[in-house]
Image (cartoon, grey):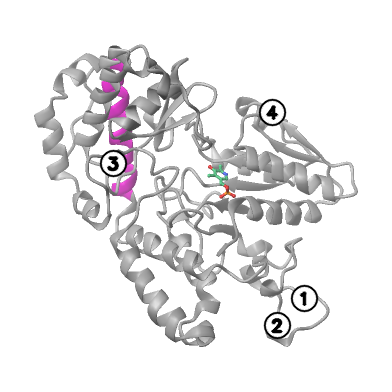
Amino acid sequence: MHRKFDKTTTHERRDAITYAAIRRWDNEDPLRHRREEFDLPGGVIYLDGNSLGPLPKATRSRMDEVLTKEWGQGLIRSWNTHDWIDAPLRVGDKIAKLIGARSGEVVVADSTSVNLFKLIGAALAARPDRCVVLSEPGNFPTDLYMAEGVIGTRNCAAQLRLEPADRIIDSIDSNTALVVLTHVHYKTAAIHDMRAITAKAHEHGALVIWDLSHSAGAMDIDLNGCNVDMAVGCGYKYLNGGPGAPAYLFVAERLHAQIASPLKGWMGHLRPFEFEDRYAPAPGIRRFLCGTPSILGLLSLEVGVDLMLRCRMQDIVQKSRWLSELFVDLVADICPTLELVSPTNVLERGSHVSLAHPDGYCIMQALIERGVIGDFRAPNLLRFGFTPLYLRYQDVWDAAYTLSDVVHSGCWADPRYAVRAAVT
Ligand SMILES: *Cc1c(COP(=O)(O)O)cnc(C)c1O
């Protein structure tokens, strides 16, 4: 077993980290063969799988099959013959296994933003006498914007109230309709206590929506174990669904009959192919579908999810912690000018690590040019994602040393690294 997290002091631990030891960890890693299932470019250490997962090799062949056979030959018949029509629920059932949900509680649809709109709207309609949607300042912007947007469409006194993370739980009261939070913070990686916040919300009759975009596929999530009402999440990050892959949403079965989507699209209708003039929601999670699903995106996402389902979640979670702990230890050792803004305790953060530096943008560009791909989050954060399926401990070691070289050589001060691209 890995020895890094035994009860040695920090000093002894650092002494124990040698390149030879790291190579041994890679050889003993139960996930070591998963890397071969990805089409990774040579000369790149990819520390941005928390933002856009890489291409699984099987996606290429599956897409070829879907294009040639299902779309090309099957044409419209494939809605039935290849069961496209049930793909949102089928892939939803698979994602359910990764997040502690039951079959029939998760559906793949739309984007995370649109799913937030649907669920926030549904929740507010279910708590008509309450005024407050509670979230935190600095939450992922779309979560806040969508809450603001839904509130704007409702002719009521509802308001979005933002409280700092450590005050959320005490801010929940009988006027709270809904708490909307991101489980793992997209910048700092700080984890919210899903169980405690959900329990407190329920104590006061409020509902909760958890955004799992930065946790699903990298962490243990037990939605039903925590009695969660609703959740959303992204398909293109840890689930490796491809750029702009469809998102998913979860609604606990006990709520299905009580809440409905404010976006009453025909795909969520009880009988879509009766083409009725009046809307009637489908029973179950299907009512949260809106328009015709993106089949190419869905089937590409399914490949990523299937790949993950072949791994043991406990291996993924354990390796995620070891990778990120190794990185944090190395950076503290060889690049102490970078300030760790993520929680120091690995158990209190998700699968990415953020480091602050006033010239973070330039440093990241110089690093990317040297083959270590992370990203930058304004105003000053270098962000690195640790994805257990295809990263090796040796990659983390190499990335930390390259980062240290870039920072200490001052090469990042070249003006070309200061040119801002549209996507950071
Ligand atoms: C990535 C991410 C999203 C993305 O939403 P889209 O609608 O896919 O653009 C939403 N919320 C969080 C917390 C995210 O990290």
Q: Which residues are magenta?
A: 314-332
In what quadrant of the picture does the N terminus appear? top left
Numbered label attached to residue 163: 4
* Residue type (three-letter) at the residue carrying disc 3: Lys
Residue 356, x across and y down, in percent = 45, 19
| Residue positioned 33% across, 36% down in the render | 321
**Residue labelled with disc 3:** 319
Sequence-wise, which precedes: disc 4 or disc 1? 4
How many numbered marks have been drawn onto this rendered protein structure?
A: 4
Q: Residues within 10 Å of mark 4 (few under 14, many from 20)?
A: some
Which amino acid type is marked by label 1?
Answer: Ala
Image height of 277 relative to 2, above or below: below
**Magenta: predominant secondary structure element?**
helix
The image quadrant that residue 176 belongs to is top right
Q: Which residue is mark 2?
A: 271
Q: Residue at x 35, y 72 (%)?
A: 64
- Where residue 53 appears, as percent x and y from the top left, is 39, 49
- Going from the N terminus, do you reach mark 4 or mark 2 first? 4
